[in-house]
Amino acid sequence: MDAAPASDLIIDTAGVTFVNSVGIREWVRLLRSLTGGGSRTVTLDRIADVLMTQMNLMPRLAGAQYACTSCGAEAALLIDVAAYAGQLQGLQAPRLPCPECAAPMELADFPEGYRTVFKA
């Protein structure tokens, strides 16, 4: 990882369309190498749904899925972590609008599973 700058990094994964278990293994290795010395922070921005799905299989990399009780839609929604920091640190999932009907969606999983993602 010689080409990575020594400063903090923001990685946008919105364009990722496919990843398998080998890709996730390499992703974890990349993140470890980037944050290894503790002098750099890596922020994930716009996490692709395919990455979220794979990361949900790994407790250390858990992500969130939402469901709409009004129309039944399910979605992996982008959450503005800065805007909802207090709620997330308190393990309270923000109620975000459904992309199908605009009704508030609810977290479709147990908030306790996300302790490693949103730590105080």
Image (cartoon, rainbow, N blue to C red):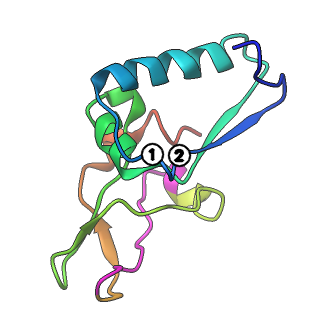
Where are the magenta residues, as a range?
A: 88-100
State left or right for residue 86 relative to residue 2: left
* Image quarter hosting the C terminus: top right
The structure residue drawn at horizontal position 43% and vertical position 37%, both measured from the top left corner, is 115
Question: For residue 80, which quarter of the picture?
Answer: bottom right
Q: Is residue 91 left or right of residue 87?
A: left
The answer to whether residue 114 is above or below residue 5 is: below
- Indicate the secondary structure of the residue bearing disc 1: loop
Residue 66's place in the image compared with 14, above or below, is below
Mark 2, other Cα within 10 Å: few <14 / some 14–19 / many ≥20? some
Magenta-span inclusion, residue 68: no
Q: How many marks can you see?
A: 2
> CB of mark 2 within 8 Å of CB of mark 1?
yes
The kind of residue on which mark 2 rests is Thr
Question: Residue 61 shows which numbered tag?
Answer: none
Q: Quadrant of residue 67?
A: bottom left
Q: Position of residue 21 (x, y in %)?
A: 29, 24
Magenta span: predominant SS is loop
> Is residue 94 located in the magenta-colored stretch of the structure?
yes
Q: Residue at x 76, y 23 (%)?
A: 4
The residue at which mark 1 appears reads as 16
Q: Which mark is residue 13?
A: 2
